[in-house]
Amino acid sequence: MFCTHSLIGQNKLTNAIYSLKNKELDKAKELIDAASVDSMFSKRAATWYYKGFIYKDLFKRDEANIKTSPLREKAVEFFLKSYEMGPNSTFAKGSSQGIKFLAQTYYNQSAISFNPTDYPLALSSYEKYKALVSRVDTTADFKEKDLNFNLAMASTYGRIASIDSTKSKLFLDKAKEIYEEVLAIDPNNITANYNLGILYYNEGVEIVNTMDYGLDLVELTILQDQIVEMFRTSLPYMKRAYDLNPTRKETLIGLQGIYFSLNDIPKSEAFKKQIDELNGSDSTKQDPNSTIEQPTKE
Amino acid sequence: MSLVPKVYYFYKLTKKEFVKKLSTVILLLVFTIGSAFSPALSNQNVDTNAKIKAVFIYNFTKYIEWPSDYQTGEFTIGILGENPALFKELDNMSKVKKVANRDFRIQSIESVEDLKKQHILYIPKGNNISISLVNSKLKGKSTLLVTEAPGLAKQGAAINFIIVGNRQKFELNKTTVSNHNLKVSSTLEKLSVLVN
């Protein structure tokens, strides 16, 4: 009796593997689901490894484009179960690779979700990726990936701020906070330095742009202090970006604008000259205001 | 139990498959991370100084009193020389603001010879125009002469923009103002840098 039961149970698993090999995934799922609730196989790492593998293939077939795929969640759960049943077992390496594979899908999902609508998914997917990799690789180093992730997230916050004025301050502050965090780890990060410089500069410009012409002189004095403070705060970041790459055109344009707004015209013009040299043309003979719309003369 | 050898055999196949699939994913990863970075924010071609000057100039219209023969018709601001950014700001201002229910008229003036009965005459810096020549043309007129270069208030401009601590401030020459029959409020005087 025991022998018959054992053979039936064994058939469930071996048949599931056979179906998987023949790409009969639905049948494989049915068989492995049955095997995994069979007390004979439910405590074996092999059962959960194959269950994870079958669910992983089902995810790829049916739910690869579903952001919150239940099949992927299940596959992860089964691979983890197999891995934790015997980290040194025959199936540990396969389960580990299965987990890493699915972790990569979360990472990719994060990378394509950096937009004003899906950014929460970018965040949760990246956290999921890190959590999974950490489970099977305790030496995993996320420093560089964290840096790239933070830069992309800050950039996304900047985009949200630019399209939604009601949330502008909130998201600009979030972006600034992230760039500061990046610079605390990597002070020479050119993207963080440049973008932080631009964010502060734009904040100053935004105050000017929204200023009413009828503003009282006393209020104007207060606002000028705020504007100058923004431009002054912006300057060291932009200068750092310049030191790191003195020929980057965007940085030169940034410095030209900041110095101009700080009424330091000689320095602004010096950077304009560098931009002109980069452009391969000497525009020093041109009207310095030539990029600004010309007035209609009476 | 003959399961283990079979499993091992199948496991070897799946391992190969994993390696193949993983390398595909890693390639995709590099691409998607690269495209995840959005361009940095930028806000160029904004002349913040011109907007601030326009706000100052609008305040001058509120805190300076012109004689009665200047209190009808359009309120004219002339710019003698080139400053397209300021012209644009003043033009924008003229569309939304008035001086005591009077419309603004912003003029670009090419030559001293073209000066007429402007309420305010603005001379941008770098325009190599003689202040004494302008003042001789403005003699007997109630035109507020506004400049933006060091020392011009002492040379005869009524108001001269200066830079103090990266901020725009203005010098006031009370003698010149009164010579043109203009009255300055105490508020404006307090916020100015007096040159005499």
Image: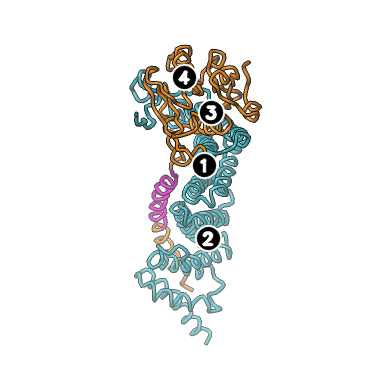
Chain colours: A cyan, B orange
Residue furthest front as drawn: B69
Chain under numbered label 4: B
Of the numbered discs 3 and 4, the one sitting upstream in the chain is 3
Relative height, residue A176 to residue A105 (above, below): above
Q: Say left or right for A287 vs A38.
A: left
Amino acid type, label 3: Trp
Say which mark, if any, is on residue B66.
Answer: 3
Chain under numbered label 2: A
Q: Are marks 1 and 2 on the same chain?
A: yes
Q: Say left or right for B196 vs A289.
A: right
- The Cα atoms of the two marked residues, 2 and 4, are separated by 77 Å
Amino acid type, label 1: Thr
Tell me if residue B27 is in the magenta stretch.
yes
SS for callout 1: loop
Q: Are marks 2 and 3 on the same chain?
A: no
- Label 4 sits on residue: B125
- Label 1 sits on residue: A210
Q: Of residues A271 and B54, which is closer to you in this image?
A: B54
- Label 2 sits on residue: A92
